[in-house]
Amino acid sequence: MALACAPRLVPESRGQCVSGVDVLGTTLVTVGLTAIVLPLIEGRQHGWPAWTWLSLVAGYAPRYSARVTTFGTAVDITVSELSIEAFFPADASTAEALSALAAAAA
């Protein structure tokens, strides 16, 4: 019911910065999820052969890469918005060293 009413009730809106589909990210997520789900479905039936364990381990890499790809392309924060207080140094000597680096970079 909600899907049938949505086109009439929800106004059309478009973002200012329209981007296409992230093909690399989509491919990596698909490969990663397949590498995780397939051995979980088929592994028990085949007695958990080595390929199931290798596939489960290998399935994490594309998921991690897709996450890095997604976060690497977003423009959420710029370098100028970072401040020394954002890093919460562990001790006074680290705070002084970071402050000196920040002053030298500015």
Image (cartoon, helix red, strand yellow):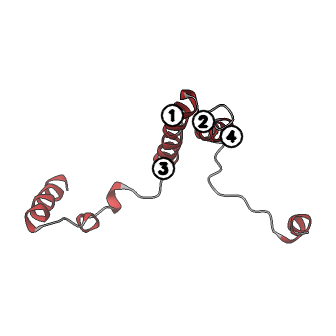
| Residue 80 spot, x, y in % from top left | 33, 58
- At label 2, the amino acid type is Ala
Image height check: is 59 above or below 106?
A: above
Distance of label 2 from label 4 (alpha carbons): 11 Å
Distance of label 1 from label 3 (alpha carbons): 21 Å
| Residue 76 spot, x, y in % from top left | 47, 58
Between disc 1 and disc 4, whose residue precedes?
A: 4
In the rendered structure, are the residues bearing label 1 and label 2 in contact, judged by CB atoms less than 8 Å apart? yes
- At label 4, the amino acid type is Ile
- Going 65% across and 50% down the picture, which residue do you hit? 18
Other-residue count near label 2 (Cα within 10 Å), few / some / many at <14 / 14–19 / ≥20: many
- At label 3, the amino acid type is Phe
Distance of label 3 from label 2 (alpha carbons): 22 Å
Residue picked out by circle 3: 71
| Residue 42 spot, x, y in % from top left | 68, 35
- Going 79% across and 63% down the picture, which residue do you hit? 12
- Count of numbered labels shown in the rendering: 4
Residue picked out by circle 2: 35
- The furthest residue to the left: 93
Residue picked out by circle 1: 58
What element does badge 4 sit on?
A: helix
| Residue 48 spot, x, y in % from top left | 59, 34
Q: Give the position of the C terminus as an image quadrant.
A: bottom left
What element does badge 2 sit on?
A: helix
Between disc 3 and disc 4, whose residue precedes?
A: 4
Other-residue count near label 1 (Cα within 10 Å), few / some / many at <14 / 14–19 / ≥20: some
* Closest to the observer, 9 or 51: 51
